[in-house]
Amino acid sequence: MKVIPGFRLTLGITVFYLSLIVLIPLSLLVWNTTELKWAGFVKIVTTKQVIASYKLTFTAAFFAALCNALFGFMTAWALVRYKFFGKKLFDALIDLPFAMPTAVSGIALTALFVDNGWLGTWFCKIGINVVKFAERFRLDFVNIPYLDKENGLQTAFSPIGVFIALTFIGLPFVVRTLQPALQDLDKEVEEAAASLGANRFQTFWRVIFPSVLPALLTGFVLAFARALGEYGSVVFISGNIPMKTEITPLLIFAKLEEFNYAGATAISVVMLAASFVLMLMVNIIQWRTRRK
């Protein structure tokens, strides 16, 4: 099989550009950690403050990606399968988190979900009513953090705010990954399933869902990986309280401000490894999908 003309030239340019933009900077990041001994590296990345930031970052990113997988599927389904007034506007709004500077989205979310914000006020009222209901029936969930009788449910400056910000920036990844898969579905297959006696749920669960599952998993992993490295939209709404609402990217930035380059590099390598594993999972999913 003959390769296309100019293969060697284009391959060389591709490798050079990829090395210049991606491989060399990341290699230098890993190389800088070699100045640390293994014991020093482990000591830095396993301190209590760093472990707490890992827990918050990975937990909030996972649940945000899970939430986006559910509602992103519904959004993509509505945009692909139905015609309604303002559809093009809603479709354009999906890409808004891509276009907006992350700091702007962080300020906007903080203004909305702070205690006296439009949505924060409602969450506070709901939280107060929940606590009163729990106390009346002597339920055990009244001791939930950031939920009390006086202030209600605190969304901004809490892990809930981190979850909200990561959900905001991750939604486009799921929707844009699912839309082509849903558009490629053959409606005749659904009609055949209906003619054989399958109800709507059976048609969805046994025909539609298996077909779009690889795309859904890809969107989930992309949203998860994007959330792990998010900084701008989270830094305002999180409150940046060490051991409580401090995310790992913010901790890296804080160590750079302290001129603790070794600590920042060590933590960065851990996050780089996590992101690489996630991207590898995406490629494996796509490779297996193409084989099928």
Image (tube, helix red, strand yellow):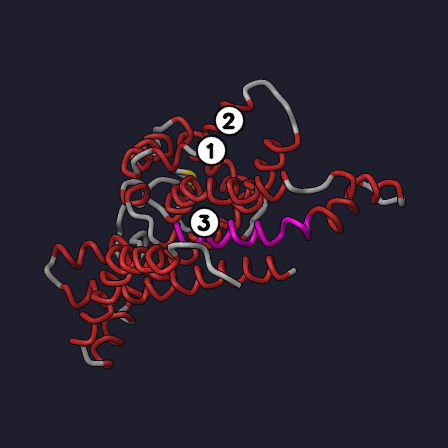
Q: What whole-number distance in Å separates the C-alpha atoms at marks 3 and 2?
A: 20 Å
Badge 2: few (under 14), some or many (20 or more) residues near its Cα, within 10 Å? few
- The residue carrying mark 3 is 223
Horizontally, residue 58 falls left or right of residue 253, namely right
Mark identifier at residue 80: none
Residue lying at the far top of the rendered structure: 85
Q: Amino acid at mark 2?
A: Phe
In this view of the protein, can residue 37 be seen by the observer? yes
In this picture, is 99 found above or below 148?
A: above
Q: What whole-number distance in Å separates the C-alpha atoms at marks 2 and 1?
A: 7 Å
Q: Quick one: quadrant of the C terminus?
A: bottom right
- The residue carrying mark 2 is 90
Q: Which residues are magenta?
A: 209-226
> Do residues under tags 2 and 1 come within 8 Å of each other at their CB atoms?
yes
Q: Earlier in the sequence, mark 1 or mark 3?
A: 1
Whole-percent x, y for residue 21 in the image: 26, 55
Q: In the structure shown, which secondary structural element does the residue marked by tag 3 occupy?
A: helix
> Do residues under tags 3 and 2 come within 8 Å of each other at their CB atoms?
no
Q: Nearer the viewer, residue 2 or 239?
A: 2
Q: Amino acid at mark 3?
A: Ala
- The residue carrying mark 1 is 94
Whole-percent x, y for residue 9 in the image: 33, 57
Q: Is residue 165 magenta?
A: no
> Do residues under tags 1 and 3 come within 8 Å of each other at their CB atoms?
no
Q: Name the residue: 74% across, 38% down.
A: 187
Horizontally, residue 54 falls left or right of residue 41, namely right
